[in-house]
Each structure stands twice: as C-alpha cells, then as structure tokens.
Amino acid sequence: MNKLELQKTANEIRKGIVTAVHAAKAGHPGGSLSCADIMTYLYFEEMNIDPKEPKKEDRDRFVLSKGHCAPALYSALAQRGYFPVEELTTLRKLGSHLQGHPCIQHTPGVDMSSGSLGQGISVAVGMALSGKLFKNDFRVYTLLGDGELAEGQVWEASMFAGFKKLDNLVVIVDNNNLQIDGPVTEVCDPYPIDEKFKAFNFHVINCDAHDFDSIEAAFKEARETKGMPTAIIAKSLKGKGVSFMENSVDWHGVAPNDEQYAVAMADLEKVGEALCQM
C-alpha cells in the first residue's frame, strides 16, 4: 500500500472503532483511535499474515497488551478480511465473538487473550523466546499503553527480553499521555520512557504515531536491529480523528450517544473526503 491508501484504511478503521463502541454502548474509543495508524501499518504492511490461514505456523504474532482497546484490533482485523466488517456492530453483545477484550478462542486473527495490563507483553516475550528456541522466523509485536507502564510486570518482561537478546520482538508504546484517571504524568509518571527501555537493553526508536513515513522508518529500523529487542515509542493523540474526543481523558472508556456518534462519523467522513481528493 502507498501512504495515501494507508491513510484511507486507517480512517476506515477509525470509523469501525466508533461504530462498534456506539453499537455496544460501551468500550474504549480514545485509546483505540490513538493507535489506529499503528494497527493499520502492522496489518497492511508490516506483518507476515494471511486472513485465509489465521493459524499458519510461520505467521508473525501480535499481542494487544492494552486489551481494552480491542475495538482497534477488531476493526483492523475486519478491514484485513478476517471477518465481515458488519460484525463490528456486535461488539460486546451476547453470542458475539467480539468480546470486550480479545479472546483467542473465538476471534479469527487474535493471537492472545489479553486485558489484564502487563500480561500481554509477558506473553509476547514468551512467544519471541519460543521462536528463537525452535529456530522459527516469525516476529512478535505487542502494543502497550503508556499508562500500562506502571505495571511492574512490564519491566520484568522487558528485563528478560533484553537479557535474552530477543531481536524478533518489537514492543510498541502508544504514548498518548492519558490514562483512565488523567495525564500519565499525574497518575504515575513513566518518563523518560525511552531511557527506561534502553536500560533494559532495548534498541529504542521514537516515532510519530500518525505519520506513516515516521511509522515506516521505525519498523524498518526495528527489522534491521540485531542482537536486542526493539521498543518503538509512538507519540500519539488520544481520540485521534474525532474532534470532541481528541486529547480528552473523558473518552477513555465512554461510548458516544446517538448525537455524538453522528458528529464523530461526520468528522471521519470529512477526513475520508479530503483523502479522496488528494
């Protein structure tokens, strides 16, 4: 995909996020919207995957460590062809395979059940170690929230990954500066995030989470890094793409009502129209 196609796809993924959360009347739109561009690049450019063979052995693995942002993962999977986009409106409903947090047993393309913060990166490290032990070529990607970095388990996993030189592992931090209780600097300041990962023997890359040139360069550098895992600190905007949600902690875990949904979709339609004219 070229950059314009990636931008259009990311916008469709954002529409899917808003639609799913509105239909469920529950969910986490803010952090899902902030990572939509990263998810787009992973599923449409970076990862070796095949929707027709979601369990193929040599596929790259993705673990959504910040599992509450499942709408972003589901929307990306739907756009990639793992299941129909129309199913996004069944989020959190009885009988749906789209649960509030990713579930490996029920949803095609989900590589790990997640949601308890800190555990996702730990499993991803285990997957990467397995790849090394069995001499497999797959790569493992995991996405964390910056608020999630307050979990001690994150750093236990990171210490182990750095010690084992897992250069098949890429940890991505969705650095939107907001968590459920407010700015991360006021809840439990994680900065400097890059220096912390460096201390655990990671190669660290800072990137703009909404610029596909910056994202592409970051993942290319990660692939070229040998002998150590990579951490990509992706500077993002919570609620990206929806005017009244952007950089607002109020939209961490609240669904839009009908009127707000209409405004949100109008915002995204305008973005889509502008992209079509480019």
Image (cartoon, rainbow, N blue to C red):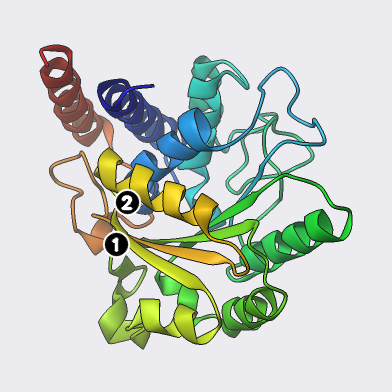
Residue 47, image quadrant:
top right
* Cβ atoms under marks 1 and 2 closer than 8 Å: yes
Q: Could you say where residue 242 lies in the image, as x and y percent from the top left?
A: 19, 40
Graded by Cα atoms within 10 Å as few (under 14), some (14 to 19) or many (20 or more), the crowding at tag 1 reads many
Compared to residue 130, the image places residue 42 above or below, namely above
What separation in Å lies between label 1 and label 2 (alpha carbons)? 9 Å
Residue for badge 1 = 176
Compared to residue 214, the image places residue 87 above or below, namely above
Q: Amino acid at mark 1?
A: Asn
Q: Could you say where residue 96 lies in the image, as x and y percent from the top left?
A: 66, 29
Label whose residue precedes the other's in the sequence (1 or 2): 2
Q: Could you say where residue 146 lies in the image, as x and y percent from the top left?
A: 40, 69
Residue for badge 2 = 30
Of the pair 122 and 233, the residue shown nearer to us = 233
Compared to residue 222, the image places residue 185 above or below, namely below
Q: Amino acid at mark 2?
A: Gly
The quarter in which the C terminus is drawn is top left
Compared to residue 88, the image places residue 135 above or below, namely below
* Residue 53 relative to residue 189: left or right: right
What residue appears at the point 63 percent right and 68 percent down from the top-left corner?
227
